[in-house]
Amino acid sequence: MSAERRLRAWLTAIGALGLLLALAPLFAFWQRLPDPIATHFGLSGAPDGKLGRGLFALFLCALVLLLPCSVWRRAPRPPTAEAVATVPLLLGTAAFMSAVAATSSWLTLWHNGDRAVWSDARHLQPGELLLVLGVPLLAGAAVAIAARRRWAALAVAPAPVDVLPLERGERAYWSGGARNRWFWLIGLGIAIEGGVLRLVVGGSPVGLPVLLVHLAVLVLLEQLSTIRVSVDERALTIRYGHLGWVRQRVALERVERATAFELEPWAHGGWGYRGSLKLGGRAAVVVRAGAAVRLDLRDGTRLSITVDDAETAARLINGFLQRRGEPPAGAVLEQLEAHG
Amino acid sequence: MLVRILGGDDAPIYAQIASQLRRAITEGKVAEGERLPPARELAESLNVHMHTVLRAYDELRQEGLVDVRRGRGVVVLGRGQGRARLIELGRAFVAEGERQGLELRDLRKLLGELA
């Protein structure tokens, strides 16, 4: 079975089981539930939030299907070690979400069953929260471990290091970018919500600080909406935002190897600047899904950057690294300079 | 967008830079509306004078491939409707002719025969 079909089979199984466990008991006891039902409980354990029965069922479906649907078309192809390594995490998370839907459904049934109105629902006991999160955690971990065993054999050998051979005295520069309009649009939406709705329409005294916070969010999102990456003999440089004022430089001396790969945001925790080189040893600049370059640094840390034409960037960096150690051909450079 | 300056190439550096940027634009590797890197950055990276890069940019501007504006940088205008491609081919043609010892007159004649 191909990696793609196998991933889909697992996702289907997890999704189907999740739907069955979450919805079957709900529908079996449908007539014995009040409408709306209590779905949220306060600190004291008393019900303080309600939802229509139908909406609750829909919410459970969304919880189960969200992840399988969003990654359905994104099977790792070809199944490189990099891509396969992210599969257990993905499937474990899918199983976790399915199980959360199931335990939420059971608990809601238990609290609302045979009650006339939602506010009469049984009070929530602290131990029951353990059930809602503990069972899914166990299910997620079990699926992730099982998936790791099954998928390890599928990984093909890592791609050989791709090098752009550089001549002695040759100079080279590469530049590429990545952009994602959604950052802008979301930032703009937040700023408008903060500015227009709160300050102008609401006329609230707390409006100004709130507006400033929203504008700060807009600036932050703008910085991540577009990046430009350049590579020269000394370093790889990331320039954030349209103006490129914020820069991040990685000296090539620190780099062991560069690899181009297809980045999946879900494998790096989402979009934006994910992780930290200093704290976690792993970081990723995720502007969008797709072409990305990964730098394996000499200190064992790893930085991934989404950027168009990542293959050329990786080849050039490897070319510089390979040539390193050769004596610089100073004479040739001087001569060429005279021409320019 | 990759720019390489070969040590053994006889062509002047500005011409090498212009030629590679021209190819990147005509092949669509740099899209219309995108900006070329600032001349200062490219010059520092390639270890050449900024004037060398500016001269390359100016050549592209004269060919109608880019627009140079103060404050906005160098903006790619499009693929140049094939003209840039012709210029690229023409340069290769002339260079090869020179290598074979042909003069401009001979090249013109050869072109006339081909047309």
Image (cartoon, grey):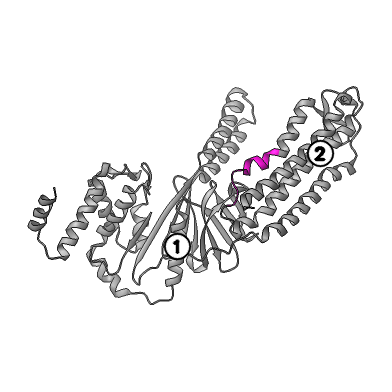
Magenta residues (range): A65-76
Q: Label 2: few (<14), some or many (≥20) within 10 Å?
A: some
Residue at the spot 56% in from the left edge and 55% down from the top edge: A78
Which mark identifies residue A21? 2
Give the residue number, with chain letter if any, for mark 1: A315
The reply to whether callout 1 and callout 2 are in contact (CB within 8 Å) is no
Chain of the residue on which disc 2 is drawn? A
Residue A67 located within the stretch drawn in magenta = yes
Circle 2 SS class: helix
Q: Residue A89 vs residue B79: left or right?
A: right
Residue A222 showing in the rendered view: yes
Residue A335 location, quadrant: bottom left
Amino acid on which the number 2 mark rests in the picture: Leu
Residue at the spot 43% in from the left edge and 52% down from the top edge: A176
Where in the figure is residue B71, as x and y percent of width and height?
35, 44
Residue A36 location, quadrant: top right
Residue A88 located within the stretch drawn in magenta = no
Q: In this view, does A160 lie above or below A29?
A: below
Chain of the residue on which disc 1 is drawn? A
Q: Residue B12 vs residue A297: left or right?
A: left
**Residue closer to the observer: A245 or A150:** A150
**Residue closer to the observer: A208 or A229:** A229
Where in the figure is residue A73, as x and y percent of width and height?
59, 43
Residue at the spot 63% in from the left edge and 24% down from the top edge: A202
